[in-house]
Each structure stands twice: as C-alpha cells, then as structure tokens.
Image (spheres, rainbow, N blue to C red):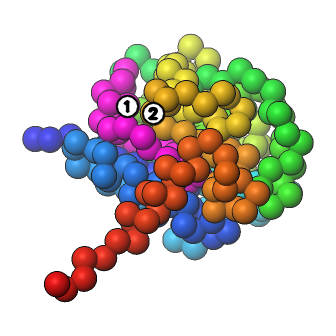
Amino acid sequence: MTDIVNIYVGFDSKEVVAHHVLSQSILEKSSVPVRITPIYLHNVANIFTRERNALQSTEFSFSRFLTPYLSQYEGWSLFMDCDMLARTDIAELWALRDERYSVMCVKHDYQPKVETKFLGQVQTKYEKKNWSSLILFNNAKCKALTPDYVNTATGLQLHQFKWLDGDDLIGELPVTWNYLVNEYDKRDDAKIVHFTDGGPYFDEYRNDDYAEEWFATRERMLHVQQRG
C-alpha cells in the first residue's frame, strides 16, 4: 500500500492565502498521495484552550504541538508553518524519517537580522529558534504532547523540545528543507523555503528571494479551465 504523507499546516487568519499556496506547491510537486490538514484555531477550539500570548507572531505558535494528538499518536506526521513554499517533491523529505528519533527538524543556528517582522511583530530571539517551524513527528514517541500539556506548558518548553527526554532524540534535517528567506543567502537547491520575516503577500516582502515563484504558484492555484 502506498504511504500517504500526513501533513499539518499552521493556519493563520491574517494570512489565509499562505496556506493555500503552500498546499498548491506541495500538491503539484508530490509524487505520492498527501493528506493536508490545516491547524485552524476555529476548528480546534474544544481542544486548544490557552489564551494568546503577546509574543505569539502567529495563531499556530503553540497549537502546532497538537500534531501528534491529532494524528492519534500513530505513524509519522509533518508539521509546516504556512509561510513556506515547497520547491521539490515532499516524498524526498518523507523518505528521511528515522525511527531512532522522536522528532526531526532543521537545527538552525543563527541570529535574526531584523528586530521586527510582518505586521510589526517583535522578532523574539531564543535558543532553537525556528527549529519547530518544520517538524517531522514520530507520533508514538511524542505522547508527552497531550492537549493538557500543550495548553499549559511555557513557550520555551514547547519550542525547545523540553518535553523530550533529551536533545539526542532530535534528528537533524538538511538546512535546504527549511531554508530561511533573507536570513540565508539565496540558493537554487533550497527544497522548502520559509518566508519567516514575512510572506510575499505582504507588500514590504513582495520582492524578496523566491517571491516570484510564490506568485507564480498562486496563479496556478487560482487557475480555472474555461469552456472552450
């Protein structure tokens, strides 16, 4: 039986178009079936009950950690921020799953170049920043992420993977799978690009690296075949 890539995408009502363009980029490049589920606060209101923190830059800052619970703690799931664009087959990333680990991610080691990002949000700085923006969850090994824990743990406990027994349970993915636009120099082999400072759908970022590809993907998403 063909494996289905189980993907959860953080959904933010301030950037609705981002989810749909990311989904389009995944669908049109994938060589295998995918299941894409948005984590939208409106849909998980009976599960995710914590109040919004002033430091949250997106609605899914913490709700992303519900991914293993929403997957019934079975198999693997991929979480992605919505402000990303897939530039290659997601099956290549799925093939990197390693049962030795509880989670796998790109282990960024950088200091943000800007103090504020989209919509004037403060650019918070902390250890393991952006590691959690793309996570391969080995769901059965992430049972510590109960709804109660996700609702009550501190932001750093969640984003720094303090719910794991140790950092040795975090597998490392190549940086090209979560390539930070503007923070890193443009490179042609970036497989998933991440508009972490702000997506091209915000006017001040519409000329950033990879923006033309994002707009081209949006146009394909909007395509309708008219009757000839």
Q: Which residue is mark 2?
A: 191
- Which badge, 1 or 2, comes first in the chain's sequence? 1
Q: Are dots 1 and 2 in contact, CB under 8 Å?
A: yes
Residue at the spot 46% in from the left edge and 63% down from the top edge: 218
Seen in the image, is 115 located left or right of residue 107?
Answer: right
Return the mark for residue 93: 1
Instruction: Judge from the rendering whether residue 31 lies leftward or rightward of residue 29; answer left or right.
Output: left
Please tell me whether mark 2 sits on a helix, a strand or a loop: loop
Please tell me which residue lies in front, 224 or 85.
224
How crowded pointer 2 is (Cα within 10 Å; few <14, some 14-19, many 20+) is rated as many
| Res. 50 image quadrant | bottom right
Q: Which quadrant holds residue 35?
A: bottom left
Residues in magenta, as a range:
71-98
Quote the CA–CA distance across marks 1 and 2: 9 Å
Determine whether 183 is above or below 204 in the image. above
Q: Position of residue 214 (x, y in %)?
A: 51, 53
In percent of the image, x 50 and y 21: which residue is there?
Answer: 174
Residue 112 magenta-highlighted: no
Can residue 151 be seen here? The reply is: no
